[in-house]
Image (spheres, rainbow, N blue to C red):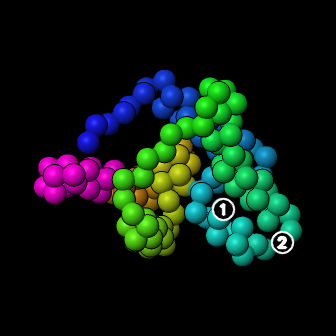
Amino acid sequence: MPTEFEPLRALAGGGLIGLAAVLLMLGFGRILGATGILAGFLTPASLQDWSWRAALLLGMASGPLAYAAVTGAMPTIAVPVGTPMLLAGGVLVGLGVTFGSGCTSGHGVCGLARLSPRSLAATLTFMATAGAAVYAVRHVFGG
């Protein structure tokens, strides 16, 4: 299973995520935690609360269109597993977000920037778990 790492695209994407986090904090005083934003979108406290969440989610979903506008082609996305595995992964991520009090964007991007000890512990756990999962898939299960 080859890994296609493109440092310039990764740097550009990370820079845009950081810029979005800073702008959301400056404009609304809110932390860019994607799952929290989605949860608040589904159960908003007010119309104003729903509006900024809807705009942010629309911006996230329109990423492939922006990519196509810049490169002239839609990004190629290959999902090497079936629907049952995607659903199981979604459930596991949802459980992790619930028990971890946030997701990678909330803890890893915003929490670390605020020097939050809880976010540091969560991010280290995310990274260790991801490393173990990649090792297991590539070297134990032979994927």
Residue 4 location (% of width, % of height): 36, 33
Question: Vertically, is 107 above or below 94?
Answer: above
Q: Determine the residue located farthest toward the left in the rendered image.
A: 140
Quadrant of the drawing holding the N terminus: top left
Q: Residues within 10 Å of mark 1 (few under 14, many from 20)?
A: many
Q: Determine the residue located farthest toward the top in the rendered image.
A: 8
Asked if residue 129 lies in the magenta stretch, the reply is yes
- Residue at the spot x=42%, y=27% of the render? 6
Left or right of 2? Residue 26 is right
Asked if residue 77 lies in the magenta stretch, the reply is no
The answer to which image quadrant residue 106 occupies is bottom right
- Residue at the spot x=29%, y=57% of the render? 129
Q: Determine the residue located farthest toward the right in the rendered image.
A: 47
* Amino acid at circle 1: Ile
Give the label on residue 46, or none.
2
Q: Is residue 129 visible?
A: yes
Q: Secondary structure at mark 1?
A: helix
Give the label on residue 45, or none.
none
Q: Label 1, on which residue? A: 37
Stretch in magenta: 127-143
Name the N-terminal-most of marks 1 and 2. 1
Residue 141 location (% of width, % of height): 16, 57
- The secondary structure that dominates the magenta segment is helix
* Amino acid at circle 2: Ser
